[in-house]
Each structure stands twice: as C-alpha cells, then as structure tokens.
Amino acid sequence: MEVAIVLLIIAGLSTSIVTVYKTVFNTDHKLEEQRNINQIGKALNTFLAVNSYVPCPDTDGDGLENRMDSSGISVCSDREGGLPFNDLGVKDKDAWGNAYYYRVHQRAVDGARINDICEPASVLGKSGSRSKVNLAMCPDTNVYYCAAALNNCDDACTSLCTIPTTTIDPRPATGTTSAPFFHLATPPFGSVSGSLNIQITDEAGTKIDEGVVAVVLSWGANGSAVNDKSCVGGTASEFENCNDDRNFVNIKTGENQDFMTWVTVSQAKVAIIGSGSFR
C-alpha cells in the first residue's frame, strides 16, 4: 500500500513537471518566433526598398524565389510555396523547426496583370513590358487614378479625365522593363481597393488591412501537422490559414497560435518612396 501511494505521488509529480516544462518550452518558442516573424517583416521591407518589388514564393526549396517567363514578362511560378529565405537573408525555419509558408497575390502568376500599374499584383512585378489598363488622369491636378469613372476620377476631378489608352505612364521613364511596376496610383487608392487581394482578419472576423499582396506564416506549435497539409486537430481559424485560399486569420492567442507578417501595397509605396522611383 505504501509503495503504491509513493508511486502515485511520483506519477503526479512527473505529470506536473512535464506540464510545466511543456508550458515553458512553448512560451520560449513563441517569444522566439515573434522575434523571427518581426525580422522577416523587416527583411521584406528592406528587399522592397532595394529591389522595388516583392519576391515570389520559393517552389523548389532552395530559399530563392521562383519565376518563369510569360511572353517576355517575369511572373511567379506559383502563388504559394516556401519563404525565399536566402533572398531575404532570414531563417529558413520557424522556432519549432518547420518551414515557413508564403502566399502572394493570385494575379502574380498572370502575365497580363503583374506589370499593370492598376493591379495590386504589380508590387511583385520584376521585369518585362508594362501595361496601364484602366489608368486615367485628372487634367485639373495631374493626379492619376486607377479603375476610376472617366467623368469623375474617383469624385476628385471636375473635368473629363484622359482616356486610359492615351494616358501617359507616370512610372519612371528610365528602366521601363524593370521594377517598380507599381506607382502611387496603384490601388488601394482613395475608394478603389483593387481586385483579389489577400484578406486578413482578426479572430473576430474584422478585416485588418487593405491591399495585402504577400503573407508569411508560421503555423506555430502544431506546424508539423499543418505543413503536410493535413490541417487536422486545429481550430477553424487555423484551418483557414491552411486551406490554400487567399483568406487568413491573424491568430494571436491560444496554445496553437499562428504567427504571420504581411506586405500591403501601401507598405510597398512607403518602402521605395524615398528612393526617388516615384514622381
């Protein structure tokens, strides 16, 4: 009887120790991952400032973005894949030893869209010919607008706007086959939000940001199960981050918290505005 009681006490203590260790282990890893994801966000901004475009996903595991030629235009090989960690100069795996997931705007694989000034996906444009479908200019202010009604230019112009096909391209005249392919007029701008952007909400379902063109994700403590796309054992929000669509939830609580950072069109504009690429 005494031996049984001692064994019961030891078992209880062992369980408590394991629970405490697991809690401390996960807490340490969460703190580490928050630092990692912040560093990735900074690296993306630096890459933007230097190169004037956002990199495509890594689809072959070498840490470099993967692109292909589409009628003379450089497009992403896929809209999702791994983080191009070598291009960015960051860690290849998260705090739990799992690869990062990287998703970009779905039109980044479209040669007719990726270099168009009125497409949010143009933030990922790297090289090739330019296009400016639906670009209009207000002659009163010389301000450019995308997807604006020609008779009101986003309700900010009293004169008839220039027909899109004759609008002068406001992007820098030099290097017209290289980045940046986006501009201050690229949506979101005013009431024009742009098409098919990545959607990020908080856990209550409220939209967090407008014009997201790329997102980096660590699936946290249960990332090994998510990385193989089984997506099992998680919450509905975790499943949303694992189901290959353009909707994501910024999960900031819970045992299996996800960690993410993202790039918006506005961030891209700010990142290179000091370089003199815009006028």
Image: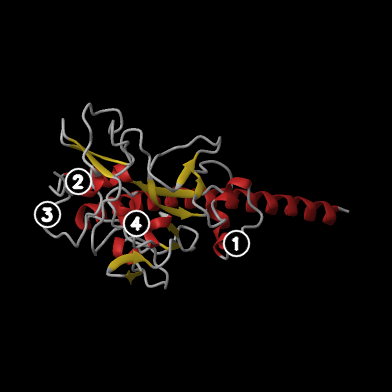
The C terminus - image quarter: top left
Q: Check disc 3 and give the amino acid type.
A: Ala
Would you name the residue on which mark 2 appears?
167
The reply to whether dot 1 and dot 4 touch (C-beta < 8 Å) is no
User: Looking at the picture, how far across and down is residue 160, in whole percent?
Assistant: 23, 33
Do the numbered discs 1 and 3 sit on residues whose CB atoms are within 8 Å? no
**Mark 2: few, some, or many residues within 10 Å (few <14, many ≥20)?**
some
Q: Position of residue 272 (x, y in %)?
A: 20, 48
Left or right: where 223 falls relative to 277: right
Q: Earlier in the sequence, mark 4 or mark 2?
A: 4
Q: Amino acid at mark 4?
A: Arg
Disc 3 to disc 2, C-alpha distance = 14 Å
Spatial CA distance of label 1 from label 3 is 49 Å
Asked which secondary structure carries label 4, the reply is: loop
Q: In front of the other: label 1 or label 3? A: 3
Q: CA distance from mark 1 to mark 4?
A: 35 Å
- Of callouts 4 and 3, the N-terminal one: 4
- Tell me the kind of residue under disc 2: Thr
Residue at numbered disc 4: 113
Secondary structure beneath label 3 = loop
Q: Where, by quadrant of the figure, is residue 104 drawn?
A: bottom left
Where's residue 69, x and y in %?
32, 71
Whether residues under marks 2 and 1 lie with C-beta atoms below 8 angstroms apart, the answer is: no
